[in-house]
Image: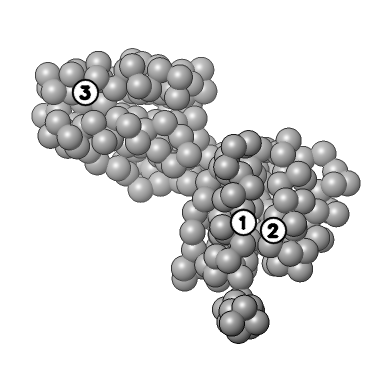
């Protein structure tokens, strides 16, 4: 029976993959990989010999129809990204959407994703939160930050290590230097780091060191009491 499996892969420690994920990767007809070199390393480690097909953000639009046609013909496929759960700030959304539109069953396996451990490790409220992923690099970035300045839920962002300090500076400008936050990097890897503090403290800390690894920034939402006081002043 045709089916698309969305299979999360480890974000660092290779032991984090599930037994079910390994079985699916072995049983499907082909694997859609964001980077065949990265996925190839994982498959070799898992002793999986299933053929890979390249599926990434640069060819996603053109390959969706080809993949869906193969699935409609009766094949099965596993979609993986370089790390974590596909479609979460990675390719996958368009293919899942297409499969649903044409009646192909989609099943997403539970598994690793970077923002969940980062959110829990932050010590900030996690009963309600908003996931922002990567902010626009240029156009729309300032507008989005201005809008988020009044967000009361805990906010979760992805960021490149090369832009971390600059982004913290922008957060200070829009959210305030005393807003509590947390920066997590190298999650599940040997040099994992989770640093908590105010935005100003985090800015000073990371300005003095070389930062490597994918970054998750968790920022406290605006206090409701402060929002009420600001509304009263405006009235």
Q: Residues within 10 Å of mark 2 (few under 14, many from 20)?
A: some
Scheme of image coloration: one colour
Q: Which mark is residue 174?
A: 2
Q: Which residue is mark 3?
A: 68
Disc with the residue nearer the chain's start (2 vs 3): 3
Give the CA separation, mark 2 to mark 3: 43 Å
Of marks 3 and 1, the one in the foreground: 1
Give the CA separation, mark 3 to mark 1: 40 Å
In the rendered image, which quarter contains the N terminus? top left
Is 138 situated above or below 222? Answer: above
Q: Which residue is mark 1?
A: 146
Q: Is residue 124 visible?
A: no
Question: Residue farthest to the right?
Answer: 208
Question: Residue farthest to the front?
Answer: 235
Q: Are marks 1 and 2 in contact (CB under 8 Å)?
A: yes
* Residue at 35% over, 41% down: 19
Residue 229: x, y in percent? 63, 83
Position of 74 with respect to 79 (left or right) is left
Give the CA separation, mark 1 to mark 2: 6 Å
In the rendered image, which quarter contains the C terminus? bottom right
Residue 36: x, y in percent? 46, 18
* Residue at 23% over, 31% down: 98
* Residue at 81% over, 49% down: 206
């Amino acid at each position: 029976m045709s089916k698309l499996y969305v299979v999360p892969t480890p974000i660092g420690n290779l032991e984090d993959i599930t037994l079910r994920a390994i079985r699916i990767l072995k049983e499907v007809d082909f694997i859609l990989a964001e980077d065949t070199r990265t996925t190839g390393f994982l498959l070799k480690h898992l002793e999986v010999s299933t053929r890979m097909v390249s599926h990434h953000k640069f060819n996603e639009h053109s390959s969706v129809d080809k993949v869906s046609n193969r699935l409609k013909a009766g094949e099965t496929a596993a979609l993986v990204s370089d790390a974590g759960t596909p479609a979460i700030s990675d390719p996958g959304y368009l293919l899942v959407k297409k499969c649903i539109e044409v009646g192909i069953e989609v099943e997403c396996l539970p598994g690793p994703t970077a923002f969940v451990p980062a959110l829990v490790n932050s010590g900030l409220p996690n009963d309600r939160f908003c996931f922002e992923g990567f902010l626009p690099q240029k156009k729309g970035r300032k507008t989005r930050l201005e809008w988020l300045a009044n967000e009361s839920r805990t906010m979760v962002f992805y960021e490149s290590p090369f832009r971390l300090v600059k982004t913290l500076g922008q957060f200070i400008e829009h959210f305030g230097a005393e807003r509590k936050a947390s920066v997590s990097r190298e999650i599940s890897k040997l040099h994992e780091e989770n640093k908590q503090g105010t935005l100003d403290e985090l800015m000073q800390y990371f300005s003095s060191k070389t930062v490597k690894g994918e970054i998750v920034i968790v920022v406290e939402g605006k206090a409701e009491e402060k929002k009420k006081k600001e509304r009263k002043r405006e009235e």
